[in-house]
Amino acid sequence: MPIWNAESGLHTGRVRVRRWSGATCLAVAIGLAPMATPILANEAQLDIFGFTLRITDATGAITHVLEGERMQQFDDIGQQRAEKPQLELLSAGHVDWIWTAPAAVHHPAEQRLELLGATEGLRLPSPQHLRTEIETADVTILTQSREVLTDARATMVRPGLFMTGVGMYADVDADVIELKADVNTVYAPEESEEPRQ
C-alpha cells in the first residue's frame, strides 16, 4: 500500500519507521495534550442538582427559601438559573407564600428573582389571611421588599372571589394584591354547611 514519504513528497511502497528518543516523545505528547480551556462567558461555574438556598436578613432570620431541581451559577454575569424552582416567602418564621414556575433567573446582587413561564402563587391560610391562589406567567419577585410583579394575565382565587386581569402588583408585607387592567370579578357566596331543604 503506498504511503506519503515526507522527504521526497512522493508515494512509496515502503513504510518508514523512525526511532524517536524519549525526549522527542515527551515533547510530542506535551504538544498534543489538551490545554486547559479558559472559562467562556456564560459558562456555569457551579452546577447543582437538587438545591436549597436559605436567605436570611441582617438578624439571621430566614426570609425566603429557594429550592429546585437544578441551579447553575454564572459568576461572569451575576446570575443563577434554576429549573423547576419553588420560592417560599416567610413571615414571622412561617411560610406565607409559595411561588412555583418551570424556570427562574435569580439576580442575587439585585435581590430579584424572575420566574419564567406559567407561574403559580399560593398564600397559605392563616388567622390573618385567606387562602389565595394566583395563576399567571413571568413573575418578578423583589425579595428584599417582598413585592411581586407581572405584566401577564393573572387570575386570583379566594374563597367566594374570582378575579382576572392583565398585570399584577402585590406587596406581601402590606397584604396588597392589585390587578392592573381589564379586570373582571365574580363574587360567589361561600357554601354553607347546613343541608338545604
Image (cartoon, rainbow, N blue to C red):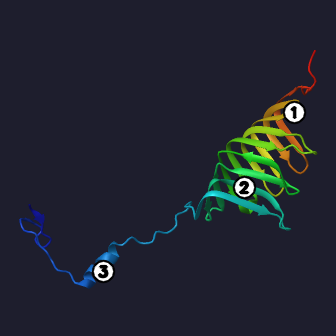
Q: What residue type is labelled 3?
A: Ala
Checking the image for residue 27, the label placed there is 3
Q: In this view, does 194 lie to the left or right of 34?
A: right
Mark 1 burial class by Cα count in 10 Å: few <14, some 14-19, many 20+:
some
Q: Where is residue 143 in the image (x, y as percent from the top left)?
A: 79, 55
Mark 3 burial class by Cα count in 10 Å: few <14, some 14-19, many 20+:
few
Say which element carries label 1.
loop
- One can see residue 80 in this view: yes
Which residue is located at x 65 percent, y 48 percent? 84
Mark found first going from the N terminus, 1 or 2 = 2
Is 117 rendered above or below residue 20?
A: above
Q: Distance between the residues labelled 1 and 2?
A: 28 Å
Say which element carries label 3.
helix
Residue 185 picture quarter: top right
- One can see residue 182 in this view: no
Q: Which amino acid does label 1 sit on?
A: Pro
Checking the image for residue 159, the label placed there is 1
Residue on which disc 2 sits: 66
Is 110 rendered above or below residue 100?
A: below
**The C terminus lies in which quarter of the figure?**
top right
Say which element carries label 2.
strand
Q: Is residue 186 left or right of residue 2?
A: right
Is 97 rendered above or below residue 160?
A: below
Mark found first going from the N terminus, 1 or 3 = 3
Q: Which amino acid does label 2 sit on?
A: Leu
Q: How far apart are marks 1 and 3 (CA)?
A: 77 Å
Which residue is located at x 62 percent, y 65 percent? 75
Q: How far apart are marks 3 and 2 (CA)?
A: 51 Å
Residue 179 picture quarter: top right
Q: Position of residue 58 (x, y in %)?
A: 84, 67
